[in-house]
Structure formats: C-alpha cells, structure tokens
Amino acid sequence: MRSAFRQAARSAGRLALDLLLPSHCLTCEQPVDAPGQLCPRCFEQTNFITDPCCARCGVPFETRERGGAAGECANCLADPPPWGQARAALKYDAQSKRMILPLKYGDRVENARALAPMMARAGAELLQAADWLVPVPLHRTRMITRRYNQAALLAQSVAKLSGRKALLDALRRVRATTPLAELSPTRRAEEMTGAIAVRANCRIMLQDARVLLIDDVLTSGSTARACVAALQEAGASRVDVLAAARVRAQHWDG
Ligand SMILES: [Zn+2]
Ligand SMILES: [Zn+2]
C-alpha cells in the first residue's frame, strides 16, 4: 500500500515537472507549445517528400510530367521493385537525422511518436488499404545492445494513430548481417538474400493479407526487398513500404 502510494506520488511529481518545464523543439532548444513539435524555423528546414513523386518507389519528381505515362521513374521501369508502392515522409538529410538518429541510437523513443504523424500523412492511402503493419526486424544481437527496435516503435505509433493493426514480430533476422553501409549495392543485395524470414506463428495471419512494411530509413532498398520476399513467400497478397525518411537516390530531382 505504502509503495503504491509512493509510486503514485512519484508519477504525480513527474507529471507536475512535465507541466512546469517548457517543451523543447524536436531538433533545437527553442520552446514549443507541446512535446514532439518542431519550432517554426526547424519546420521550415524540414524537407518533406510530397507529390509529384514516382508512383512506385516514391522518389520526388520536379514536375508531374517527369514520370511519363506510367508516373514511374526510370529505375522502376528498368528494374521494377517487388513492392506495390513505397513512400517516405522525409528526405534523409541533416535535419531529419536530428530526429531519426536519436531514436536509433540515443534512447529518444519519444521521437517515434513525433515522426508517426509525418509518416501517416505520407502513407495515408497505403495505410487505409493495409491489413497489417509489419516492422523491419533488428537482429537479436543488435536488439541486446540497443534494447529496442526503432522500426517496431514507429510501426506501433503509426498503427495507433491510424487505427490499423500491427504485427510487431512477424519478421525475424535469420542470421546476423554485415552493416550494409559498408557494402556496395550488389553486395548489399547478396548479403540480405534469405536473411529475413516470417515467424511460423504469424504465417496464418499474413495469408492473403495486404501488408505495409515499416522502416526508419530507406537506403538501397535491399533490406526492404528481403522483407518483401519473405512476406510474399508467406502468402501476403501485396506488400507496400512506408519509411520515416529515404536516402537521396541518384535519379531523384531536387
Ligand atoms: Zn527548432
Ligand atoms: Zn521509382
């Protein structure tokens, strides 16, 4: 009883502190009205990816005509990706790194809640059609050092915000992989082939389901490709991709 009282007093104290201390902008020290907001200056510097963009992979186009009749970029036409559509909320640059890197490496788990509305906006149509949100998995050894999977936190927040269901542990890494940043695009694809599998107890839920794969940053797409292959093998009818940010590709405008 006494410890319950102490616990309640401590929570109340924390709440009072939260109310007393002004909230800070997500990416600078400026005070803002509520936690998880950007100040006007940082908002101005944030590069959202908006239409027009490639219908398939979501890379931004300078003009709608740029995508031609299919509305797709040259890369997607030459080598169609295995997913239906991929979308990302932000360009991966100095500003979005200030939101994503602390979530990935700095225990700033609350940044997932701040990124979720941006992702929900970028992926509104894909979310509406999705049966399940599934995060890209983190390998167990990395899970031990980081303690949480940032893609799962994003999937959870986006699911809550959009009223969709998330299957947080549907995918698992079958083996540890070399950090992809150190590899060439061809080696990345080779490294990821067969590295991800669907958990046996989730297969039934994924049968004929439309899945939205969630990741923090889309880089070369080799991790997403391995996840899509595993989900399709388990019987998913379609897989789309939604990320917080995407790395600038050679073929995108602006
Ligand atoms: Zn700011
Ligand atoms: Zn494309």
Image (cartoon, rainbow, N blue to C red):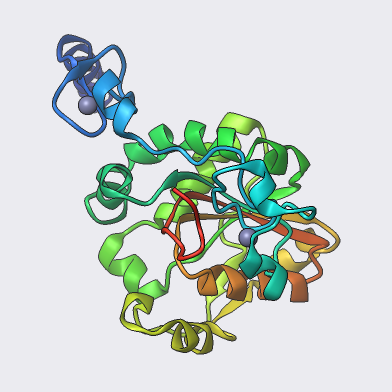
Q: In this view, does 121 lie to the left or right of 246?
A: right
Quadrant in which ligand 2 is drawn: bottom right
Q: Is residue 116 left or right of residue 20?
A: right
Q: Position of residue 145 (x, y in %)?
A: 26, 67
- Residue at 81% x, 69% y: name it: 235
Q: Can residue 253 be seen in this view?
A: yes
Q: Position of residue 85 (x, y in %)?
A: 69, 55
Q: Looking at the picture, does residue 218 appear above or below residue 195?
A: above
- Quarter the N terminus occupies: top left
- Residue at 33% x, 48% y: name it: 100
Q: Looking at the picture, does residue 241 appear above or below residue 230?
A: above
Nearer to the camera, 31 or 147 = 31
Q: Where is residue 209 in the image (x, y as percent from the top left)?
A: 81, 56
- Residue at 34% x, 78% y: name it: 179
- In the rendered image, which quarter is residue 129 located in? top right
Q: How many marks?
A: 0
- Residue at 61% x, 72% y: name it: 225
- In the rendered image, which quarter is residue 230 located in? bottom right
Q: Looking at the picture, does residue 240 appear above or below residue 160?
A: below
Q: Is residue 200 visible?
A: no
